[in-house]
Amino acid sequence: MSEDETTLSEREEIEMLLPWYVSGTLDATDRDRVERYLSDHPDVQRQLDLIRAERHETIIANEALPTASAGALDRLLASLPVRRAGLWRRLSESEGLRALALLVSPSAPRTVRFAAYAAAFLLLAQGVAITAFLLKGNEAGYQTAAGGDGRRGPSFFIAFTDAASSADVTSLLQDVGARIVDGPKTGGIYRIEVRSDDTSPPTEEALRRRLAERRDLVRLVLPAKE
Amino acid sequence: MIEGAHDAQLIGRIAAQDQAALRGLYARHQTRVFRFLLRLVRQEAIAEELTNEVFMEVWRSAGSFEGKARATTWLLSIAHHRAVSALRRRKEESWNEEEAAEIADNQDNPEVELQKTDKAAILRRCLENLSPEHREVIDLVYYHEMSIGEVSGILGIPESTVKTRMFYARKRMSELLKTAGVDRGWP
């Protein structure tokens, strides 16, 4: 290979890097290499001028383009595949909990934030009281899902009202033959399991309705699928 | 870096099926993605449809985003593949460089005649007349300001090919300019 060819090859290599040099997206090694070459070969400056003009017109051509129509996002959201969200996600999206989240956000007025914290504290206190009571060897005691007498009927996620006392909760659970197997979780949610061999959907729905009817004690009840 | 972290955070939330995060990412990047696609497919309705397909893909595969690349690189990579598929389906516009180079400059009208006296306008017309493959690499480098490595990632080609493709795109543009009466003296 002659010296001329070597020189030409190096020039081509440098020329190939120039678009990125002009755009400021070359890595440090290549940038140094280009700058060394440019200082030794001032005629390459003309190439830089051409590239700057190309870049300028490319930007103008792109910026002149429209944007997607206003309804495009709505169509996208409407076409998203529906995926059954987990319970906790559904709960976090519930209006009540979302409102609570907004209330405790730093942007909420201080007095409103205090009220929200107070409500959250009451919820937590209720949870502690219920759990502590149930852990005292009560029939409707607290057990893991794997525990108990082996019969595992329908299970539900349930949240109790502020007015529900520990005794009320125990009484309700005994009425339906249920025990708490997990909780409290965020939002004062417990998981309960009904001692029954019948796990058919009608039985599950009947139990859910029975629990939901006790609006004085039950704030929310949902089937808990495995 | 902060912008990148914000994008990564949004994508993390999208992986948890957070629609608000998808809205956020869409608001930040839809113009870039839409314009990139429009320059390739040249039809607004198709570009818009493909843009939505890109974000739908993000919705489906956000969990696989590792954050090694910028979100923009990932989005444009998806957009590139969608555009290539769409163009292949349509077969109206060749993805082949040589065939595309034969695009005739047959749209002369009074406005075009006027533009022919403007060197910048001629340059823009020549950019338009490049093959989609060449126009794409030029847009990625000049407009989207992608590094060699990022272009390589978006197009799925080696970095050496990125450099030569850009070189030949510029060379082709010089030829088109020369045909239009503008001799740049290069190559």
Image (spheres, rainbow, N blue to C red):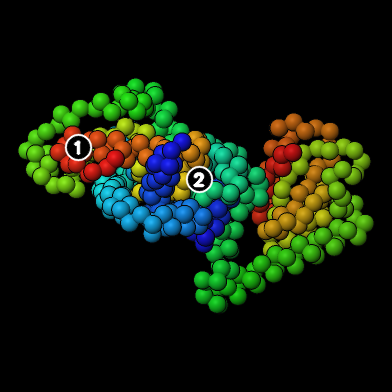
Q: Residue at x 16, y 37 (%)?
A: B180
- Residue B149's tag is 2
Locate the C terminus of chain B and report the quarter of the image it occupies. top left
Q: Quadrant of residue B131?
A: top left
What secondary structure is marked by label 1?
helix
**Would you say the residues marked 1 and 2 are in contact, meaning their CB atoms lie under 8 Å apart?**
no
Point out residue B48 in the picture as x, y percentages from the top left corner. Answer: 35, 38
Chain ID, mark 2: B
Could you classify mark 1 by the number of other residues whose Cα lies within 10 Å: few (under 14), some (14-19), or many (20 or more)?
some
Relative to B92, does residue A64 appear above or below in the rendering? below
Q: In the structure shown, which secondary structural element does the residue marked by tag 2 occupy?
A: helix
Dot 1 falls on which chain?
Answer: B
Q: Amino acid at mark 1?
A: Lys
**Which sits in the foreground, A214 or B6?**
B6
Marking on residue B57: none
Which label belongs to residue B178? 1
Of A36 and A194, the residue lying toward us: A36
The residue mark sitting in front, 1 or 2, is 1
The earlier-in-sequence mark between 1 and 2 is: 2
In the depicted structure, whether residue A44 falls above or below residue B61 = below
Number of other residues with Cα within 10 Å of mark 2, as a class: few under 14, some 14 to 19, many 20 or more: some
